[in-house]
Amino acid sequence: MTERPTPDPPTDATLAVAYRDGDERAATELVRRHAAAVGRFLYGSGAPAGDVDDLVQETFFRAFRALEGWRAEGSIRSWLFTIGGNLLKDDFRKRKGRRMLSLEDRDLPDHADPHADLVAAETELRVRQGLAGLPRLQREVFLRRAQQGSDYKEIAAALGTTPGAARVHYHHAVRRLKELVR
């Protein structure tokens, strides 16, 4: 009995073309592939946890409306990060000086190990504050490299810099974040 080879899954570029041609399933597949990564990127960039889903959804809405403008030179994920990052910047500008806290969004702590929970929460807060305090390029390079595993060439293409500069930004970001966590 001869085993049939399974076809390779379609590339993002193939799915983008299929969506442009009217295939809604292609859009569903692109969302399935990239939504979680976009959400992690936005949360790591400082988006409030309660706003991440809305920002991810708006990122995809804008991306699908502007799909004709996507140059297949870079990855679609990097393009989505750029769109999401711009949405987040716009959101920060709108909220400038305002901060809303919802009691409903807060989980009750698990009291299994209160000290470990406190240490973890304090460390997370320091890292998030540290990320927010990094210069934009350092933060974006760090998040793309550490969260998404992007290589320096891809990061450089997405951010309009060189791979060497991306390495330097990553190095400085790591050094500053390590100082905060200690």
Image: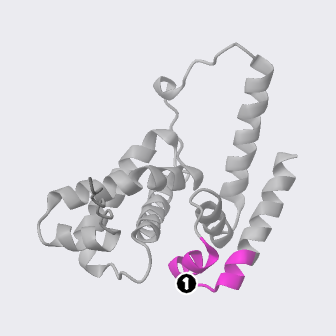
- Quadrant in which residue 59 is drawn: bottom left
Q: Is residue 142 magenta?
A: no
Residue at image x 70%, y 82%?
A: 165
Task: Looking at the picture, tell me which residue is in the foreground, 132 or 8.
Answer: 8
Q: Is residue 71 visible?
A: yes
Q: Residues within 10 Å of mark 1 (few under 14, many from 20)?
A: few
> Quick check: 160 left or right of 30?
right
Residue at image x 49%, y 29%?
A: 102
Q: Is residue 66 visible?
A: no
Colour option used: one colour
> Where 8 sits versus 169, above or below?
above
- The residue range painted magenta reads 151-167
> Where 51 sits versus 30, above or below?
above
Residue lying at the far left of the rendered structure: 22
- Percent x, y for residue 71? 35, 82
Task: Looking at the picture, tell me which residue is in the foreground, 50 or 159.
Answer: 159
Numbered disc 1: secondary structure: loop
Task: Looking at the picture, tell me which residue is in the foreground, 104 or 118.
Answer: 118
> Quick check: 119 left or right of 79?
right
Main SS, magenta residues: helix
> Quick check: 123 left or right of 4?
right
> Quick check: 34 left or right of 20?
right
Residue at image x 45%, y 56%?
A: 91
- Percent x, y for residue 142? 66, 64
- Percent x, y for residue 20? 17, 72
Q: Name the amino acid, label 1.
A: Gly
- Quadrant in which residue 30 is drawn: bottom left
Residue at image x 50%, y 57%?
A: 92
Task: Looking at the picture, tell me which residue is in the foreground, 171 or 17.
Answer: 17
Report which residue position mark 1 lands on: 160
